[in-house]
Image (cartoon, rainbow, N blue to C red):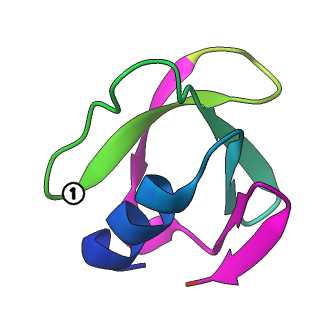
Amino acid sequence: MLKEKFNEILANTKNQLLIVIKDESFLLNLNKKAVMNELGVIAIHENTGSATIVFFNDIDSIISDGQKFSA
């Protein structure tokens, strides 16, 4: 997924953002400013609860407020 598309989806998200990579899910805390650079963003792994760098190129889809966007 392109960073520009990710930023556009992030800007329009009001409640919940879920990043899907293969069969793993990552949450993005919308109450805090997203920490990102040109390559990726820091998100919370849904199963382990640990912070992980998610690369934009690896993102398969994003679920924003219940709406799914493919990469």
Instruction: Give the image location of residue 30, x and y in percent.
Output: 53, 30
Instruction: Give the image location of residue 18, x and y in percent.
Output: 70, 49
Q: Is mark 1 on a helix, strand or loop?
A: loop
Q: Name the residue under label 1.
A: 39
Among the 4 quarters of the image, the one containing residue 22: bottom right
- Quadrant where the C terminus is found in the figure: bottom right
Residue 8's place in the image compared with 70, above or below, is above
Residue 56's place in the image compared with 27, above or below, is below
Tell which residue pokes out farthest to the bottom in this image. 70
Residue 16's place in the image compared with 34, above or below, is below
Amino acid at the residue labelled 1: Leu
Count the marks.
1
The majority secondary structure of the magenta stretch comes to strand
Magenta span has 24?
no
Among the 4 quarters of the image, the one containing residue 14: top right
Among the 4 quarters of the image, the one containing residue 39: bottom left
Instruction: Give the image location of residue 15, x and y in percent.
Output: 70, 39
Taking the spot 28% from the left edge, 69% from the top edge, the residue there is 3
Taking the spot 51% from the left edge, 19% from the top edge, the residue there is 31
- Quadrant where the N terminus is found in the figure: bottom left
Residue 15's place in the image compared with 54, above or below, is above
- Indicate left or right for 7 with 39 as reference: right
Taking the spot 80% from the left edge, 70% from the top edge, the residue there is 67
Binning the other alpha carbons within 10 Å of mark 1 as few (below 14), some (14 to 19) or many (20 upward) gives few
**Residues drawn in magenta:** 51-70
- Indicate left or right for 59 with 1 as reference: right
